[in-house]
């Protein structure tokens, strides 16, 4: 039998190559689809799990720092400040104030009263302070974790106070600082909400015998905002605000409570 002509062989080879290309492309397509069907759910699951593990609400932000703190001596007057970015910025701008006075900062930016309540045990009670300074509420008004409900906010503050009280920790309740809104549109009537919440905190403190510290009045301008020379951005104090206004007043409040406690003992 004679072999096929050269032209016929070429056609067969070209046909074979084209057929193989089609099969290869089809195979790659099928593999790609299968990999996507497998990988997309897996990647989604990993992202979800990682998000849970990443502590998105920063409830464990101070876990390592807490582990490094020793139990205070019997005569040691440890004071813990718990709050939001106003408290957190305080130690950043005025670190020496905290170190020199044995004060511990446990402020975390963006947190509402409910988030502070959730971490109150590990960030306050288990540090065994004699005094806790609580500054909560401004991020509730800013609706960082949901619609603002002053009753819910006060309940969270009361829960923190009661937890402190049950563990023999003296309480200083700090007023919300003045603010006109800080770009929180469409949230309205921010100064009015601040004043009302401060009044609720003040009344509660008076009824229960806790120390209420008014930092709003000395930081307030004629338009119900924060005095410009004491403010970074209308919401957060600058170094002068902490140093000249807030520190002398909070120091006086802490000294009064500790001296009163010593007399009772």
Image (cartoon, rainbow, N blue to C red):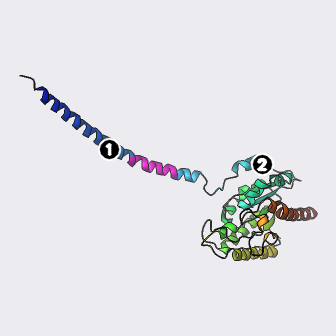
- Disc number placed over residue 69 in the picture, else none: 2
Q: Most prominent secondary structure in the magenta stretch?
A: helix
- Quarter holding the C terminus is bottom right
Q: Is residue 43 magenta?
A: yes
- Identify the residue at the far front of this view: 229
User: Splitting the image into 4 quarters, where does residue 10 fall?
Assistant: top left
Along the viewing direction, whichever of 207 and 183 lies nearer the viewer: 183
User: Splitting the image into 4 quarters, where does residue 248 fall?
Assistant: bottom right
Q: Earlier in the sequence, mark 1 or mark 2?
A: 1
Along the viewing direction, whichever of 225 and 101 lies nearer the viewer: 225
For label 1, the residue is: 29
- Taking 155 as reference, is 102 above or below it? above
- Taking 213 as reference, is 7 above or below it? above
Tags 1 and 2 touching, CB below 8 Å: no
Tell me the magenta residue range. 36-47
Crowd class of label 1 (few under 14; some 14 to 19; many from 20; radius 10 Å):
few
**Which callout, 1 or 2, points to the residue nearer the camera?**
1
Structural distance between the alpha carbons of marks 1 and 2: 58 Å
Horizontal side of 222 relative to 6 (left or right) equals right
Name the residue: 71% across, 74% down.
191
Along the viewing direction, whichever of 128 and 195 lies nearer the viewer: 195
User: Splitting the image into 4 quarters, where does residue 213 fall?
Assistant: bottom right
Horizontal side of 112 relative to 258 (left or right) equals left
Horizontal side of 131 relative to 232 (left or right) equals right
Name the residue: 76% across, 76% down.
199
Residue 198 visible, this orientation: yes
**Image coords of residue 39 (percent x, y):** 42, 46
Name the residue: 53% across, 51% down.
49
- Disc number placed over residue 75 in the picture, else none: none
Residue 124 visible, this orientation: no
Q: Is residue 139 magenta?
A: no
What is the secondary structure assignment of the residue under circle 2? Answer: loop
């Amino acid at each position: 039998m004679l072999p096929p002509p050269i032209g016929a062989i070429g056609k067969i080879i070209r046909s074979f190559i084209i057929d193989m290309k089609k099969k290869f492309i089809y195979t790659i397509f099928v593999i790609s689809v299968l990999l996507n069907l497998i990988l997309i759910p897996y990647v989604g699951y990993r992202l979800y799990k990682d998000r849970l593990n990443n502590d998105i609400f920063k409830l464990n932000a101070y876990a390592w720092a807490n582990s490094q703190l020793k139990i205070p001596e019997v005569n040691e007057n440890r004071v813990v400040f718990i709050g939001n970015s106003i408290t957190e910025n305080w130690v950043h701008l005025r670190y020496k104030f905290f170190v020199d006075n044995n004060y511990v900062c446990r402020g975390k930016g963006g947190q509402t009263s409910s988030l502070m309540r959730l971490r109150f045990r590990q960030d306050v009670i288990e540090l065994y302070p004699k005094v806790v300074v609580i500054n909560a509420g401004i991020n509730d008004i800013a609706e960082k974790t949901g619609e603002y409900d002053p009753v819910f906010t006060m309940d969270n503050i009361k829960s923190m106070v009661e937890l402190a009280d049950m563990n023999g920790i003296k309480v200083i309740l700090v007023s919300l600082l003045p603010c006109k809104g800080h770009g929180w549109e469409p949230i309205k009537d921010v100064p009015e909400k601040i004043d009302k919440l401060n009044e609720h905190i003040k009344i509660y403190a008076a009824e229960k015998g806790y120390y209420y510290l008014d930092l709003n009045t000395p930081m307030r301008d004629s338009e119900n905002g924060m005095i410009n020379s004491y403010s970074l951005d209308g919401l957060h104090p600058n170094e002068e605000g902490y140093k000249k206004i807030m520190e002398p007043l909070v120091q006086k409040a802490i000294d009064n409570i500790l001296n009163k406690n010593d007399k009772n003992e």
